[in-house]
Amino acid sequence: MSASSFQALRDLESAAQANALPLPLGENGEPQWQGIGYQLGGIRLVSAMGEVREVLQPPRYTPLPGVQSWVLGIANIRGRLIPIIDLHRYLDLDASLPPSLARVLVVEGGGLVAGLLVEASLGIQHFMVSAFELPGADVPGAIAPLVRGAYRHGGRIYYEAKLSGLLEQPRFRDVAIHDEERTPADTLH
């Protein structure tokens, strides 16, 4: 892509943001927040619409040697090679739903793109902006570093997670198995 093409895209993005419509209003005229809902280890989460680029059926992937067990492999998604990460393994959570419901959330941030395997997609979720709460002591420990707050709706809690922040964590970026972590099964013959 040429520099002028890239600048044209940036200009288009800036114009779109400057002319964006306000948040949708609920029945009572109050602004609503929208996000993509998903489930991870039996916990309901939601991430901002712009943060999740795509929701996919788990794609075919090629396993990679010498990487952490939570890196499932690499997949070709629309011509881009994207690592597929099992968020359950990464966060040390157990899935609570059958694998047939699993989905991959494509997320970009910090110069990286990744496909994050979750146990289910819960579709687009709508919450009143006033329903947002800062995170409390009830945030499950495994997801606490990702959580910005929560929305309560219909007796359920949805934790707002910043997935792009996950991609910036040093542990997430260090996918190689180090010598002290190697097992005989990791050794290539």
Image (cartoon, helix red, strand yellow):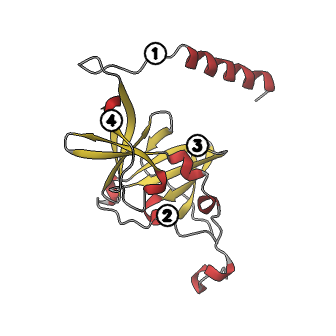
Dot 3 surroundings within 10 Å: few (below 14), some, or many (20 or more)? many
- Marks 4 and 3, how far apart in space? 20 Å
Q: Which image quadrant for residue 61?
A: bottom right
- Write down the residue under mark 1: 21
Q: Earlier in the sequence, mark 2 or mark 4?
A: 2
- Write down the residue under mark 3: 108
Kind of residue at badge 4 = Gln
Q: Is residue 142 above or below residue 50?
A: below
- Write down the residue under mark 4: 125
Residue at 60%, 63% in the rendered image: 171
- Marks 2 and 3, how far apart in space? 17 Å
The secondary element bearing badge 3 is classed as strand
- Write down the residue under mark 2: 90
Q: Earlier in the sequence, mark 2 or mark 3?
A: 2
| Residues tagged 4 and 1 counted as in contact (Cβ below 8 A) | no
Kind of residue at badge 3 = Glu
Residue at 51%, 38% in the rendered image: 51
Q: Position of residue 17 (x, y in %)?
A: 56, 20
| Residues tagged 4 and 3 counted as in contact (Cβ below 8 A) | no
Residue 124 located left or right of residue 188: left
In which quadrant will I find the N terminus?
top right
Q: Nearer the viewer, residue 137 or 48?
A: 137
